[in-house]
Amino acid sequence: MPPTIMRCKVLIALVIWACISIMLVVWPAPQLLPPPLPATSPHPRPKHHHNQEAVHRRWEVWRRDGEDGDVFYKERGDGDNDAIMSRNDDKGNMNEKMMNSDEKSENKNSKRGNVVNNMNRKVERRKMKQNINNSEDDDDYDLTKFMEDTGGQYNVTPPNAQLLVYNRIPKCASSTMQTVLRWCARWLGFEHVSSEVYDERQLKQEARRRFVQMLTAFNTASPSSPSALSSSSSSSSSSSFSYDRHLYYIDFVAEGAETHPVYINVVREPIERFISSFYYVRSKERLARIAAKGHLKVKPSSYWLNRTVEQCVMNGEAECSFVNGTKQETVITYFCGHQEFCKTVGSSEALQRAKQVVAERYSVVGLVGHMEMSLQLMQTLVPGFLKGALDFYFNIRKKKEKLNRNSHKPAVPREVRQELRRRMGNDIDFYNFLRQRLFLQAQTFLTK
């Protein structure tokens, strides 16, 4: 073979070897695939639900109907009807959306990058686990026990109950619920009484006992007015009625009654409720009504009237501080009761008592963000008082009735909302508890 041809073959071999070496160095490492999802959910649904596809569709509708940024049920994948329940509170939990965004931004083009990212994920999981362990209420993060503690799988409505109590909470769709109850009363033939007492929400023991005696004496007179309820005369007639008032929870049996009434309520997302209430108490319409009744003793200052939520939070005003140990009415107070600790901000005792009362005594605690589902549960579990409630609610929306709406409510910056969530930790915890219970009730009683 001539030397020239030999040199050409050697040169070509060297070029091919160099190209292969460069490709091995530059070519990206194979992507490490995540482990496959388990075939079954770690928290399966109750076995008595046969139509899982219908359950899946209903959950999807309710998820879209919730508050903005408050995702509760997240789909796991096509054909899989199990749902991952995600908590969105501020007790150190890693937001799932942020985690997904971080994972997408990881370096997947080299084995070294994958190793580093895996180590980072382990560190984040360790931090999250440590935050969970440091939480005051570990049950919130034990999903199985958490679901058991809500009582959502049971119907706690007292049988043959002739009294319904709606201890309404300000700025939680209470005007809408009052209208629904009035319509139900006319349709089903019972009486509904709306109390004209607004400020006396915490009662002493003797006052609580008199209140219980007044309501349980419904068979002594036709309760068409609050004055009739206080009548002590006897009568052979008997009828059911419902009663609403801004009032903290009262244990009727503990105050001398033979049975418990039906308890219902509706709650709003804590931050939205606080913002709405903050501007509502400053509204010109409300102040004009109070002045017309002669109840406006001191004229509010212009500084108080024009103050915004942002200024209140950033300046550390008492109205927006929610300092642990201080006394302040919250949503928890309405379910905890009349004891002094029920008004203590950050009280774990008040939080646990409120959860226990809801689980054992409230037929339904609805949510403003899931009003249709809440009313559907109410008419299912309390048909004697709320049959047809959902249809009446649709009629109210169709007529676009203006029920105690607050027209002046400026936008609140995101960082202010986050600070409020930090300060109102117990309220957020309690709201998540109520939301979990409501969805468990819907799963148990609406999907059979």
Image (cartoon, helix red, strand yellow):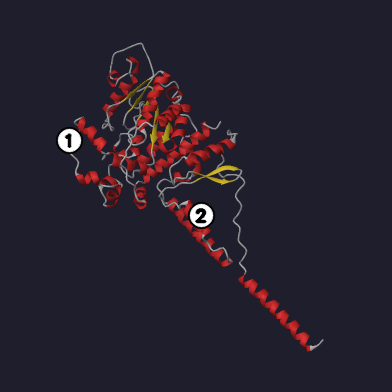
Residue 153 in percent (x, y) is at 50, 33
Q: Callout 1: helix, strand or loop?
A: loop
Disc 2: CA contacts within 10 A as few (<14), some (14-19) or many (>=20): few
In the picture, the quarter occupied by the C terminus is top right
Residue 248 in percent (x, y) is at 32, 33
Disc 1: CA contacts within 10 A as few (<14), some (14-19) or many (>=20): few
Disc with the residue nearer the chain's start (2 vs 1): 2
Residue sitting at x 54%, y 45%: 75
Residue sitting at x 40%, y 18%: 189
Q: CA distance from mark 2 to mark 1?
A: 55 Å
Relative to 375, is 31 above or below? below
Left or right: where 438 falls relative to 275: right
Which residue is the site of mark 1? 297
Q: Which mark is residue 100?
A: 2
In the picture, the quarter occupied by the N terminus is bottom right
Q: Quadrant of residue 227?
A: top left
Q: Which mark is residue 356?
A: none
Residue sitting at x 58%, y 66%: 110
Residue 164 in percent (x, y) is at 38, 25
Residue 16 in percent (x, y) is at 70, 77
Foreground pick, 71 / 323: 71
> What kind of residue is marked 2?
Asn
Residue sitting at x 62%, y 46%: 39
